[in-house]
Amino acid sequence: MKFGIDMGHNCPPDTGASGIKFEDNLTVEVGTKVIAKLKSLGHEAISCNPSSASTVSQSLGRRCDIANRNKVDLYVSIHFNAFNGQANGTEIFAISDAGKKTAKSVLDEIIKLGFFNRGVKSGSHLYVLRNTNMSAILIECCFIDSAKDMQLYDGEAMASAIVKGLTGKVASAPVNIIKDEEDNTDTSILKLQKALNQLKITDKNGKPLDEDNSIGPATASAVEKFQKIAGIIPTGMASKATWDAINQILSKRVVAGTKATGAIVRYLQYRVGAVPDGIYGPQTQGAIKKFQQQNGLTADGIVGAMTWQKLIG
């Protein structure tokens, strides 16, 4: 079976809700695991997330276009709710009878994790359900502003429940292997390790990478960490999008003003402790000025040669 998995939002200006955690982070976490688990069961699964969009409407349209163009059998959009800090539980939206049947199967598995059952609901008002040519569901996994739900939440368990509901089978995710899609030579691994070290991206234990020119769990975890920072689907594999983001940052171009967006801004936000939304706003500018002041630079909020020198050498 061929599945289209839409990891909700994650395409500025199409960004998700925030609460105790950020919706964008959780949809990617769950969606990536769902794709891996479906593939481990022998199914075909593709990401329906667009690489870019100018508006939220364009982002939604491109998700549907990817699913329709690839003729997937089932479209699954993954989201997380937020409301008033008190609401909690799981609800799934569908339109067709087939979609509602699938939605109930998935919901039955998720509520086994302890989440309140908010039911299967009509999704006739949802763009992605109305504009996909196949059976489709939209999962609101739980509430990110609910302390109760966030205590119950576990990305691995949520992904397993969704896959069990979709397929009737339990699956474990395969181990990711790092691969440079454009240059699969040993040299590309060493180049990757050097670049991540220069960018101060550590492994899952907070340690710099050994520049040993070999694939391993530490390098994979650092790649995944960088992908999350840059707003790329975190697969642990050095894709073209990953290299594009690395090279964009290493180009050290001047960043100034509210028109700056994307991976380079998200990286800057990560380094200076601002909210990682990919948009150069007043909060980001303030954090950059603070970084500049702490490092003996002119605190003008403009990331030029001297600021880049302090950031990455």
Image (tube, rainbow, N blue to C red):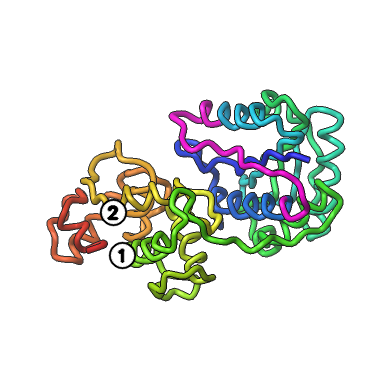
The residue shown at (72%, 56%) is 158
> What residue is disc 2 on?
250
Q: Nearer the viewer, residue 60 or 186?
A: 186
Q: Is residue 285 left or right of residue 187?
A: left
Q: Nearer the viewer, residue 204 or 292?
A: 204
Which mark is on residue 198?
1
Is label 2 in contact with label 1 (beta carbons under 8 Å)? yes
Q: Is residue 53 left or right of residue 306?
A: right
Q: In x, y percent, where is residue 69?
A: 64, 27
Q: Nearer the viewer, residue 301 or 143?
A: 301
Q: CA distance from mark 2 to mark 1?
A: 9 Å
Q: Give above or below for 74 relative to 313.
A: above
41 in magenta: yes
71 in magenta: no
Q: Secondary structure at mark 1?
A: helix
User: Which quadrant, please, contains the N terminus?
Assistant: top right
Q: Give above or below for 179 relative to 124.
A: below
The residue shown at (16%, 54%) is 305
User: Which quadrant, please, contains the C terminus?
Assistant: bottom left
Which mark is on residue 184?
none
Q: Secondary structure at mark 2?
A: helix
How many other residues sit within 10 Å of disc 2, few (<14), some (14-19) or many (≥20)?
A: some
Query: What amino acid is labelled 1 in the image?
Result: Gln
Q: Which residues are magenta?
A: 39-59
Q: In x, y percent, where is residue 258?
A: 29, 39
The residue shown at (40%, 51%) is 243
Q: Give above or below for 306 relative to 138.
A: below
Q: In x, y percent, where is residue 276?
A: 42, 52
